[in-house]
Image: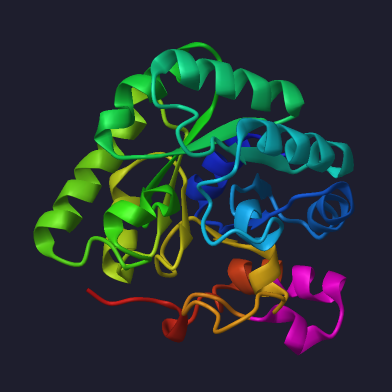
Amino acid sequence: MAVTINTLRDCKTRGEKFTCLTAYDATFAHLISQAGVEVMLVGDSLGMVLQGNDSTLPVTVQDMAYHTRAVARGNRGALVMADLPFMSYGTPDAAMDSSAQLMRAGAHMVKLEGSSWMADTVEMLSTRGVPVCAHLGLTPQFVNKFGGYKVQGKDDSAADQMVADARELVEAGADIILLECVPSALGQRITESVPAPVIGIGAGAATDGQVLVMHDMLGATPGKPPRFVKDFLAETGTIQGALEAFVDAVKKGTFPAQEHTFKA
């Protein structure tokens, strides 16, 4: 049975964890969805892991639509979420046009980065039938404003603001909140503060779901991996085994462990 946003809401209500992995092509989409991953994210991270860029900023809507179509063809029942890339949703009209392209390509939901100032855009998309995931915390499209990839929400003021932003975005119609690189306590606070499912990456174990970049969890990313990453391929020896081990670890609550999380 296909996963929908209602499936994820039910998971939150029952206190059951769910999983999310990035996918960029039909072959891996098939493997990931067959392994029981509920959400596949066609991430603009493809700019780094597939295209070799040093950030996500060069990715276009056309790039995202191409990979979304490929993932949709390989999908076997997961919910497909696609990133709106840098500056493709800077105005309401642009957001509608970009979202339409990704939904036509096979996405079931779009993801955008930004805090409460995106509430009007979220409401506009939601009322027009586009499910939205709002990405808070370390938002990679803002890397030049942040001055690098840094943990967000570490002081009380920033944490309070992020909680308020999450609530406002959900009230505007956001169906999912995604938190990246925030202290575990803040991840738990936001998860408990909103009715929408919350997906975390480097946001602690209390979020409703966990997401990783596929290349990271398969140990295929050059250089030192981020703190929140675990190489599941090293433990299992096969790609399918790694995917299933990731699902099992999230659902049992053994991942993320304390060493994968951040403190304020």
**Rendered residue at 89%/53% (across/down):** 27
Q: Which residue is drawn at 28% across and 52% down?
A: 145
**The C terminus, quarter of image:** bottom left
10 and 206: which is toward the camera? 206
| Count of all numbered marks drawn on residues in the image | 0
In percent of width and height, residue 193 lies at 28, 47
Residue 182 lies in quadrant: bottom left
Left or right of 134, for residue 218: right
Query: At 62% from the left edge and 38% from the top edge, which residue is drawn?
Result: 82
Task: Provide residue 131's location: percent of width, then percent of height.
Answer: 54, 27
Give the answer, above or below, for where 217 lies relative to 70. below
- Asked whether 117 or 145 is in front, the reply is 145
Q: Which picture quadrant has residue 185?
A: bottom left
Q: In this view, does 232 lie to the left or right of 164?
A: right
Indicate how the structure is coloured in the image.
Answer: rainbow
Q: Which of 44 and 163 is in front in this view?
A: 44
- The span picked out in magenta is 231-246
Image x and y of residue 229, in percent: 55, 76
Q: Horizontally, is 214 left or right of 252 in the view?
A: right
Examine the rendering and report whether any part of residue 31 can be seen.
yes
Specify whether 242 is left or right of 141: right
Across and down, in percent, residue 224 comes to 54, 84
**Magenta part mainly helix, strand or loop?**
helix
Between 184 and 72, the one nearer to me in the picture:
72
